Image (tube, grey):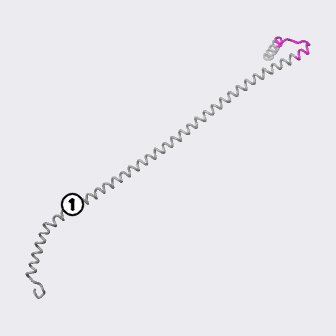
Amino acid sequence: MEALGINLSVLLTQLISFTVLFLILRKLLFGPISSMLQTRSEKIKESLEAAEKVKNEADESAEKLEKEINIARQEGQKLVQDARDAAENFRQQEMEKAEQESQEIISKANKAIEKERDLAIQSVRKEFSSLVISAATKVVDKSIDEKDHKDLIDKTLKEEINK
């Protein structure tokens, strides 16, 4: 083996040294490194689980928020519909109130017209009585007093009404 440049005693010494060094490193270095890697692996696993949990919570929160938004939209639509209904109800009430007021105005106008008609009739009666007195005076050539005149008109009107 010496022809190949390999010294057997050096090879054996290096092999024993390597084995001893390997055992020492295994005992002192590989154990702690292995446990550190195991611990790190567990921490990474826990972090991944925590991240997954946070993601799930975020998804749940997003779903809950979406439901709340939908509920708020529905409530908003209900409020809008209620406002529309209230406005329609108010409009209807105002229309009824305006109709009632117009009926009252018409009724008052009819009463005023009736009163004016009665006053006009009284005025015509007075005018008529003056004309009758004037005509009767000319025919009879004598003037009658106011009381006789009223009695004559009332008597004539009663006779005309009873016909």
Q: Is residue 92 left or right of residue 38?
A: right
- Residue depicted at 12% across the width and 69% down the height: 24
Percent position of residue 48, x then y: 28, 59
- In terms of image quadrants, where is residue 13? bottom left
Q: Is residue 145 magenta?
A: yes
- Residue depicted at 92% across the width and 13% down the height: 141
Q: Specify the quadrant that holds the C terminus.
A: top right
**Crowdedness near tag 1: few (<14), some (14–19) or many (≥20) residues, C-alpha within 10 Å:** few
Percent position of residue 119, x then y: 76, 22
- In terms of image quadrants, where is residue 11? bottom left
Q: How many marks?
A: 1
Q: Is residue 103 left or right of residue 64?
A: right
The answer to whether 16 is drawn above or below residue 120 in the figure is: below
Pointer 1 residue: 39
Percent position of residue 42, x then y: 23, 59
- Residue depicted at 86% across the width and 12% down the height: 144
Residue 13 or 1: which is nearer the viewer?
13
- Residue depicted at 53% across the width and 38% down the height: 86
- Give the magenta part as a residue range: 134-149
- Determine the secondary structure under disc 1: helix
Looking at this view, name the residue that lies furthest to the left: 9
Q: Main secondary structure of the magenta part?
A: helix
Q: Is residue 125 magenta?
A: no
Q: Amino acid at mark 1?
A: Thr
